[in-house]
Structure formats: structure tokens, C-alpha cells
Image (cartoon, helix red, strand yellow):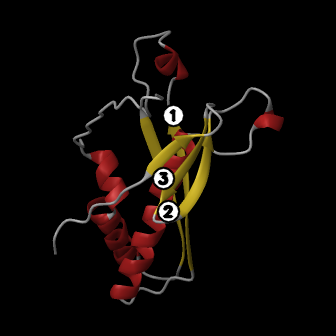
Amino acid sequence: MPPLTLKAKAISLYNSTTVKCESRGFTFTLQQSEENPEKNYAMNPMEALLCALGGCQVITTINYAKKHNIDLEGVSVELEGEFDTDGILGIKDVRSGYSGISCRLLLDTNESSRKIDSLIKTLQEKAPVVDTINNPVKLQIEAVTMSKH
């Protein structure tokens, strides 16, 4: 199979830190976390990354279980990531991204620990978001100025 190219777009709404994200006709909103909880109405990008990671783990687990006749009644993932906002703000010389992420896979099953271990191994080896986070990715950023004349 040839490599799959996915495309997405992130657009600032009203010249603010609220961002509309689009891919394949689907949309969701991201927002910089606000001090005032009443003004928080969307996840921030770091929370969305955790959700993408968890969603990928759930999908990979369900697909692997079906393929290998593993009985699962339900799957969920609880995720927690830690990062230092002083890195984003330039206050300290620390990385801006997560320094660590922990995932707790909750499986509703009576399967053996051997089969569960097999599921975990598959997640670590085959889940694409897990792979993207665990391994360096070539990232290219290009700035294009849009003229208003």
C-alpha cells in the first residue's frame, strides 16, 4: 500500500487564540486556556493531543481485539501529561512540550493476562499516534505571507 497523506487546517477565528481545526469536512475548536473558567469553552492543543493519543489507543485496541478474537466489552483510556508553561512563556529554559505522558488503559474483559499483554505490545508497536509521539518526526514549517492589496 502506498503511504497515506492526511491534510488538516487550523484557522484563527476573529484574530484570536480560538482556532477552528478542519480535516476531511470535520471540524472542532481549540482555545488557549483562559484564567476565567467562564471563558473556557474548548480544549487547548495540549489536551487535544492527549485525546488524539487516547482515541488512537482505543481504536487500535478494538481493531486488534476483533482481529484476534479477544473478547472486549469496553475500552477507555485515562491520560495525564505534564509540561512546564514557563517553557512556552520563555521564563525558563525548559522544553515547551510534554515531559511525560502516562496512559491507563481500562479494559472490560475476562481475557487472560497473556492476551492483555499482547494488546499492550500491539499498542506500543502499531498505534500510529503512539508511534508519532515516541519517535522523532520530520517537521517542516514554512511561512507564507498573504498580501492584502
Residue 27 % position (x, y): 57, 58
The residue singled out by tag 2 in the image is 55
Question: Under tag 2, what secondary structure?
Answer: helix
The mark nearer the N terminus, 1 or 2, is: 2
Label 1 Cα crowd, 10 Å radius (few <14 / some 14-19 / many 20+): few
Label 1 sits on what residue type?
Answer: Glu
Task: Residue at 43% x, 25% y: name it.
Answer: 96
Q: Nearer the viewer, residue 81 or 13?
A: 13
Label 3 Cα crowd, 10 Å radius (few <14 / some 14-19 / many 20+): some
Relative to 111, residue 49 above or below: above
Classify residue 26 by image quadrant.
bottom right
Task: Residue at 39% x, 79% y: name it.
Answer: 63
The residue singled out by tag 3 in the image is 103
Relative to 16, residue 49 above or below: below
Label 3 sits on what residue type?
Answer: Cys
The residue singled out by tag 1 in the image is 82
Classify residue 85 by image quadrant.
top right
Relative to 30, residue 94 above or below: above
